Image (cartoon, coloured by chain):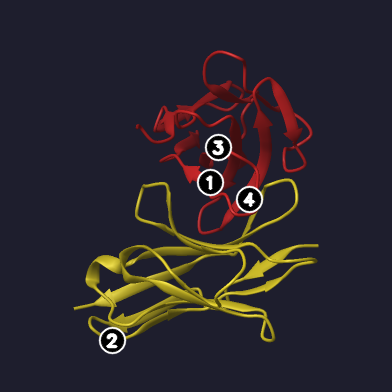
Chain colours: A yellow, B red
Amino acid sequence: AQSVAQPEDQVNVAEGNPLTVKCTYSVSGNPYLFWYVQYPNRGLQFLLKYITGDNLVKGSYGFEAEFNKSQTSFHLKKPSALVSDSALYFCANKAAGNKLTFGGGTRVLVKP
Amino acid sequence: NAGVMQNPRHLVRRRGQEARLRCSPMKGHSHVYWYRQLPEEGLKFMVYLQKENIIDESGMPKERFSAEFPKEGPSILRIQQVVRGDSAAYFCASSRETGGNTEAFFGQGTRLTVV
């Protein structure tokens, strides 16, 4: 069975500080991992993906994520958070059959 | 190139009525996926369709829910005899291909409220 976990419901960070949103996965076979962001009353926007290759993946809006096979993690990071980064973030794995299994989401609040 | 278009954005139905949610995929995309997001929860897969075919409906409730993606026109998610528990945001996504490295693009969702 495929599962993705986001252990933190909410992350609070001051503007300008580093932001980390945690994600761990449990999948059979190779993981295909994605991060999406959801702003209020909007759909999900793709941030980045890990398929194979370099463990550090760079994505949109200055975000990056580090794939760690030994820890089965794929944490999302941004060196310097902006107030506009406040949103709901979802980690997901693409399983066989092309469907995404999402984590429960982490709400990020960046305070000025 | 317009993104994934969903309509209506908001839909209010009384218990027992039917809800029809529409999704037009991005141009050139022939794979459509429907997800449901209950309040304060993550997205749950419902169904995966390719033109005129249902590929995977393992996430669809057994009764009252159906989906189609005809040769011409948008994909439709249909909920018959809605109940309050159907209140949720329903998101459609589309992709051009099915490979593991292909990302899906999401619409803005339809927020269904059953009163």
Horizontal and vertical percent position of residue A38: 41, 56
Amino acid bearing label 1 = Ala
Q: Are marks 1 and 4 on the same chain?
A: yes
Q: Are marks 2 and 4 on the same chain?
A: no
Measured along the vertical axis of the image, is residue B96 above or below residue B72? Answer: below
Q: Which of disc 4 and disc 3 is earlier in sequence? A: 4
Amino acid bearing label 4 = Lys
Q: Secondary structure at mark 1?
A: loop
Measured along the vertical axis of the image, is residue A34 above or below residue B75? Answer: below
Amino acid bearing label 3 = Arg
Within 10 Å of disc 4 (Cα), the crowding (few <14, some 14-19, many 20+) is: many
Measured along the vertical axis of the image, is residue B107 above or below residue A34? Answer: above
Q: Which residue is mark 3?
A: B96
Within 10 Å of disc 2 (Cα), the crowding (few <14, some 14-19, many 20+) is: some
Are the residues at dot 3 and dot 1 in contact (C-beta closer than 8 Å)?
no
Q: Nearer the viewer, mark 1 or mark 2?
A: 1
Name, please, the residue furthest toward the left.
A112
- Between the residue at mark 1 and the residue at mark 4, the CA separation in whole angstroms equals 15 Å
Horizontal and vertical percent position of residue B48: 67, 37
Q: Nearer the viewer, residue B13 or A107?
A: A107
Q: Which mark is residue B104?
A: 1
- Between the residue at mark 3 and the residue at mark 4, the CA separation in whole angstroms equals 21 Å
Q: Which of disc 4 and disc 1 is earlier in sequence? A: 4
Subunit of mark 3? B
Q: Secondary structure at mark 2?
A: loop
Q: Which residue is mark 2?
A: A17
Q: Secondary structure at mark 3?
A: loop
Q: Are marks 3 and 1 on the same chain?
A: yes
Subunit of mark 2? A
Residue at left offset 58%, top offset 29%: B30
